[in-house]
Every structure is written in structure tokens, then in C-alpha cells.
Image: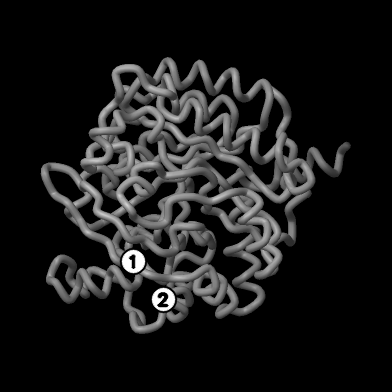
Amino acid sequence: MIDKHLKRWDLVGKTIDCHSHVGVALKMYGLVEYPYAETAEGIYYKQISAGVDINVVFPYTFDLYCDWKSMMKGDVAPAADPISEFPYKVENRTLMREVFDYQPRISRRFIPFVSVDPGRDVPGQLAELEKLEREYPIYGIKINPVACRTRSLELLDAGKDFLDFAAERDIPFLFHSMTIPNDIYSQASDIFKIVEERSDLRFCFAHAMLFNKHFLELAAKTPNAWVDTAALKIQVDLMNQLVAEGVVERSSLIDTDYTDHKEVMKTLCETCPDTLLWGTDSPAYSFHCRRAQGDGMVQDFSLTGAYEDEVAALKSVDREIRGRVSNANTLDFIFGKAIGEVFEFLSS
């Protein structure tokens, strides 16, 4: 395993976007959904436009593992002879090659996480990660249960070796997480069971768990849990829609002004001052698609936002808080608490 290219002290004071995708979502492209692709170079020019220094990046989907005809019907099923032999085999390598081989002039602007499916072909995935880490640094693991159609709790069963892989390398997990009942794969309550089981590992709950008061307060009190704001503007829009439809009770949410995502950002910073991470979800700060949520449930999304919306949320908080949510907290999540690495740095 090679050393990480970037250390904590390389990133102190930098503005870090903790949640962004590089790659292509073939299912979305084939079904005329949006967004369906992003490149590292494209993110780089967004960074320049917004004063962002670093992006955590990971693959978009594992569609090359899937049966394409089924995928074009909205289903996720392994192909008989997939292009990607294991979930994310091709996508993880393509991400690394893009960042380090094809775009070396900007490679230090990216912190690559690999993606895994926690329930399918786990030995094959791990073997590929062990090969990959001999060539490139792996800073963390991203899991999107609903995209894989694999329940997050598989990480305590079929996928338990991923936990040991991460522990041996001291790298964290970032989970797509939801608190609405129709996503059976990505429930925050299930992910918290993993967090509690493995207190030796660090975990981040993406998308602010759709502002659920109980789980945000629980995350704030849990030493190995963080929360990110990815796609904040459209998460606020979605929550307003779900409340209006009676799917979610307003009383279950943090108390804030849901007419302005910037006000929601400020309340999140007050709720989770030491564990909130800023992220854009680039390019998925807009989301137009139909997605199976499990048990025959399907959700249509028609949500429009912009990169500028996510940047505006960050800039709406004062400088000291901004430094926490876009740097200090993020470094603690990626690298662990600072004391050990700072001592190593000062002693070198």
C-alpha cells in the first residue's frame, strides 16, 4: 500500500467540498434523466469559480456491473457477463486514472474515495481494492445503498470485511443516508447500528439525513459520526414537498426556516458544530429521475438546483464556522483527530 499523497497539514486552511462524483451514470443517461456525468476537470473549473480548493471525489454509479436491458427498465441486476467483473471495479480504477494519470496537473486538488457495494461479490471487490491501493492512495469508502439496491446493514454481514479493510488503513466511510420511509436501503437508523458496532471507525451521513432532528442530535453526540450537507438546496425542496404530501411530519425536523436553504445551513451548523461537513454533491445538486426505493416503491424526483446554491450556503455562515464545516471537521473525518498526525509532523 502506498502512502497517502496528501496529509492533514497539506490541507489545513483549505476549503474542502466533502462530497462529489466523477464518472458517468449510464442508467440515467439511457433513460434521459439528469445529471448523468462529471469529470475531474469540470470540477476543477467549478473550484476556480467558487474559491474551493479540494474535492473529495468518488465514482457515480456501478452501472458497468449491471444488465443494461434491465437497467433501461429502471432495475438494478448483475449482468451475466458484466463489463465490470465486480461492482465498481472499472469505475474505481477509472476515477484514480483520471485524477492521477490523466489530470496530474490538478491531482492535488482531489481526495479520492472508492465506492463499494456492501453485499455483492465482496471478496472480488476487496481483491481489486488491494490491487488498486498499490498504485493509488485511497482516502475513504463511499456507499450508496439505494443506488446498489443493497441494504446498508449488509456491511455487518456479507460486507463485514470492508469494515476490517477500512480499520487496517484508518480510512472512513461516507454513506448516502435517508430518513424517509420509502427508501428501505439507506435508512439512517440502520447505518447508526453500524456506527455503534464499529466505534473504531469514522462514518459520515450524507444529505443531512433530510434534517431529522433525532438523528442529527444523535450524530452530534456520537464520537465517530459526522454529517454532510450535500445537495442542500434540493434536499430542502424535497423536504418541503414531502411535508406537503404528508410523508414527513414537520415536528420530526430541526426547527428552521425551510423557505431558504441558507437558513437551514445556519441551523445545521448550530446543531452539529463539530461534526457538520460542507459538500455540494456535484453534479447531483439537481436531480431528475425515477428511482426504485425498495419493496416495489418508486420515487420520482424533479429537483433543480445549482452549484452556486451550495456555495451560497457555505458563504452564508461566518468565517469561523465556515472554517470548521469546510476544513477542520472534514480533516477530522478523513484523517481522524489531529493530535497523532500533528505530533508526527512536528517530530519529523
Q: Picture coordinates of residue 328 (x, y %)?
A: 64, 58
Q: Which mark is residue 211?
A: 1
3 over 192 or under it: above or below: above
Name the amino acid, label 2: Val
Visual colour scheme? one colour
256 or 128: nearer the eye? 128
Q: Picture coordinates of residue 201 (x, y %)?
A: 49, 37
249 over 33 or under it: above or below: below
Considering the image in quadrants, where does the C terminus appear? top right
Name the residue at 31% across, 40% down: 193
Q: Is residue 179 visible?
A: yes
Which type of secondary structure does the marked residue at label 1 adopt?
helix
Mark 1 crowd level (few <14, some 14–19, many ≥20, 10 Å Cα)? many
137 or 167: nearer the eye? 137
Which type of secondary structure does the marked residue at label 2 adopt?
helix
Name the residue carrying label 2: 264
Name the amino acid, label 1: Phe
How many marks the image carries: the answer is 2
119 over 53 or under it: above or below: above
* Res 261 quadrant in image: bottom left
Q: Earlier in the sequence, mark 1 or mark 2?
A: 1
Side (left or right) of 136 relative to 291: right
Q: Which mark is residue 347?
A: none
Q: Determine the residue located farthest toward the right in the rendered image.
A: 348
Side (left or right) of 343 relative to 245: right
Whole-number angstrom distance, CA of label 1 to CA of label 2: 9 Å
Name the residue at 33% across, 24% down: 120
